[in-house]
């Protein structure tokens, strides 16, 4: 009934029918990142329409875009096969103050939907951000790296002992955030940690 009253439309061109139409989905192919690294996976270059969609999602109260991003990931059979090799899927946490301000954790919404789509366990309480810091986008490279040290803690080490864990984030710039999360997980006993980002910013 809701689809009849408010039919889905493409978030890029506005065409009615689905969250992202086939034409726009194929257009995004030019931003796809082909080269991957061991246990680090990027989907797009952080440019143009990809950048705009992510900024809208994070800062312009367009939480519904998680459906589009999740759909893109679930259509990527190669990445889904990789994700299925992990025991648990989680996301980079927001500090509770930032979460109240934004109303949602953008990485959390996507990770949860993807985990459901590939039938993997999803947990959003593994890592806790214990210190509220300024957004990474406002800092230079050195500041980004230094400011994440010691700001993440593991909530319950028993849940991750000898488990392989995939962590989602939206944008990978210097990698300081994801790598710090990886570090605390491995120190707490995780067997393997994979890092997944919607986009990689090559301009930083």
Image (cartoon, grey):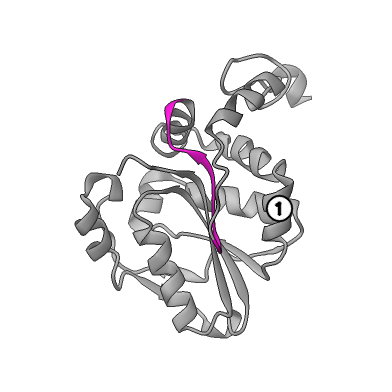
Q: Is residue 153 visible?
A: yes
Position of residue 53 measured from the top left corner of the image (x, y, whole percent) = 48, 30
- Write down the quadrant of residue 158 in the picture: bottom right
Residue toward you, 114 or 37: 37
Which residue is located at x 59 percent, y 39 percent?
69
Is residue 180 depicted above or below 19 in this figure? below
- The magenta stretch spans residue 94: no
User: What residue span does the magenta drawing correspond to?
Assistant: 38-48
- The magenta stretch spans residue 40: yes
Position of residue 186 measured from the top left corner of the image (x, y, whole percent) = 48, 79
Position of residue 66 measured from the top left corner of the image (x, y, whole percent) = 58, 40
Q: Secondary structure at mark 1?
A: helix
| Left or right relative to 92: residue 8 | right
Q: How many numbered marks appear?
A: 1
- Write down the quadrant of residue 84 in the picture: bottom right
Which residue is located at x 65 percent, y 38 percent?
72
Which residue is located at x 32 percent, y 39 percent?
203
Q: Is residue 95 visible?
A: no
Is residue 132 depicted above or below 52 in this figure? below
- Quarter placement of the C terminus: top left
Mark 1 surroundings: few (<14), some (14-19) or many (≥20) residues within 10 A: some
Residue toward you, 39 or 153: 39
Residue at the disc numbered 1: 80
Residue toward you, 88 or 103: 88
Which residue is located at x 68 percent, y 59 percent?
82
Is residue 108 depicted above or below 74 in this figure? below
Position of residue 34 measured from the top left corner of the image (x, y, whole percent) = 58, 43
- Quarter placement of the N terminus: top right
């Amino acid at each position: 009934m809701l689809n009849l009253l408010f039919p889905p439309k493409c978030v890029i061109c506005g065409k009615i029918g689905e969250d992202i139409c086939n034409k726009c989905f194929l257009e995004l192919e030019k931003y796809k990142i082909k080269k991957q690294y061991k246990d680090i996976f990027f989907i797009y270059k952080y440019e143009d329409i990809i950048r705009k969609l992510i900024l809208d999602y994070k800062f312009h109260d367009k939480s519904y875009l998680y459906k589009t991003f999740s759909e893109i990931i679930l259509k990527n059979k190669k990445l889904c096969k990789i994700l299925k090799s992990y025991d648990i899927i989680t996301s980079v946490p927001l500090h509770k103050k930032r979460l109240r301000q934004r109303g949602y954790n953008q990485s959390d919404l996507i990770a949860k939907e993807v985990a459901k789509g590939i039938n993997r366990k999803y947990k959003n309480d593994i890592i806790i951000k214990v210190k509220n810091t300024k957004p990474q986008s406002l800092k230079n490279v050195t500041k980004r790296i230094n400011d994440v040290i010691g700001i993440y803690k593991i909530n319950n080490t028993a849940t991750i002992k000898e488990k392989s864990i995939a962590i989602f984030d939206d944008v990978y710039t210097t990698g300081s955030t994801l790598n710090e999360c990886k570090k605390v997980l491995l120190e707490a006993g995780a067997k393997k940690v994979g890092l997944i980002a919607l986009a990689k910013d090559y301009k930083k």
